[in-house]
Amino acid sequence: MAVPEADDLDVVDQLADAIDEPEEDSSSPFFVSKKAAAVLKHEILRQYVTPFVSKIGLYAKDRRVVFLDGYAGPGTYSDGTPGSPALILGSAQSVAAFRTLECYFVERSRQDYLRLRALVEQLSATGIVAEALKGRVESHLDYVLEKAKGAPLLAFLDPFGLGISFEDLTQKIFGPARPHVAGGTEVLLNFSSNAVRRIGGLLLTEKAVKNRDVTLARMDEVCGGDWWRAVFLAAPDNASAVEAIANGYADRVCRQVGAVAWTVAVRNRRHHQPIYHLVFFTRHWDGVWLFGEANSIAQAAWRRECAPPHVPDDNALFDLGDPFDAEEATREESWVIEVMANIQRLLAEIGAFQLQSFHAAVLGSAIDHARKKHIREAVKRLYKAGATGCDGKGDVEKFVLTPSTAA
Ligand SMILES: C[S@@+](CC[C@H](N)C(=O)[O-])C[C@H]1O[C@@H](n2cnc3c(N)ncnc32)[C@H](O)[C@@H]1O
């Protein structure tokens, strides 16, 4: 399949710029130093990709897994911090002895693409299979999907504003050519809350706004219809609108392709509005559990990033040290207690159950924070108290929670 020529794409890019958010490239503040929101998404990638490739690649032909970074950026930040391409190439290196993680990076901006290409060439020289593609991800999708035929695919779609269309996501990436059994398809996607607020605001203004109708239509194309307009107008405030539209979008994709979604609101500070939602789609319980581990560890990195630096009090007799670890321990204890309560409630309501498909019900409001170690701790405490026959040993997702009498 032919790869579109870089220069053919420039006209399309200019049109897209008129509709999407203004183009940002490596000269923009975004790529100068990393903000807390980027810490979260990058830590998820760091934690998720290697276990995913190790696990799913075991069953794949030639142990080969394909990764698509559709909105790749320059690869690293100006201060040298890895962006998503550098992180993924690092994962490809770390699994190289036993898996092939074949990477495709697409970048629209010429300046970022040139930096990206240099990074990819550097890593390709070490034996990593990777390609940098210049242009719009939409134009390269067929090419990458052809490469991923019969192989597991993980796509990371991380635009600044609006991303790929609902149709490309549901009919191509999750489409009939990639049936459930074809090695697995997982997508981690940035659904921009800023874009929802900005474009939703167009529905409320009476003023003439350049490209208003085209922009609204582009949002319809991403959301799979204009349903989001009524949701935006009915919401009591922007925050509720953003939450409802991100979840409505995830539900629609899931219904269409038979997947489950995990939606994580990503902020630069706890009290800020989300700047985007990371939406993870998978068709496999293993994906849910692996993502849960990655998300939980990444949330801890995010809290660390947001915590104020420890400043010793010169007037105090003793410096009590950085309170962060003690605060984390308090938080972890509260998640264990929540998980214990959820398990007890489920046991009372439905009797014995296997944990694997009760992931969300067991974690409850701790879903973005707790992980397997907290579930194990909760089960061990319940076992000790005689509330379950499950002793909390072995693979957490395989636990069969029984009421104590059925043990
Ligand atoms: C948020 S940045 C990517 C950051 C990168 N994923 C990371 O984590 O380091 C979005 C990038 O997508 C590029 N871009 C915008 N529209 C695009 C499109 N349609 N196809 C490919 N790249 C695009 C922008 O130039 C920008 O570099």
Image: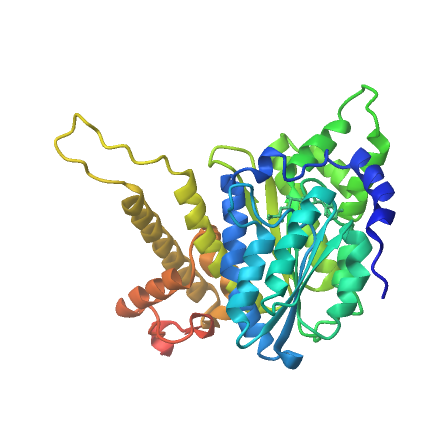
Q: Is residue 105 left or right of residue 380?
A: right
* Image point (66%, 45%), residue name: 191
Q: Is residue 98 above or below residue 309?
A: below
Residue at the outermost top position: 207
* Quadrant including the N terminus: bottom right
Q: Is residue 21 left or right of residue 26?
A: right
Q: Is residue 302 above or below residue 363?
A: above
Task: List x then y, in percent, for residue 160.
Answer: 67, 41
* Image point (34%, 55%), residue name: 337
Q: Is residue 39 above or below residue 380?
A: above
Residue 387 appears in the rendering = yes
Residue at the outermost left position: 317
* Image point (64%, 71%), residue name: 65
* Quadrant including the C terminus: bottom left
* Image point (73%, 69%), residue name: 148
Task: List x then y, in percent, for residue 211.
Answer: 84, 30
**Is 377 in front, or is 10?**
10
Report how many numbered discs are placed on residues in the image: 0
User: Image quarter for residue 236?
Assistant: top right
Task: List x then y, in percent, for residue 129.
Answer: 65, 68
**Is 322 in front, or is 97?**
97
Task: List x then y, in percent, for residue 11.
Answer: 87, 41
Check the image and tell me how it is coloured. Answer: rainbow
**Is 67 in front, or is 118?**
118
Residue 233 appears in the rendering = no
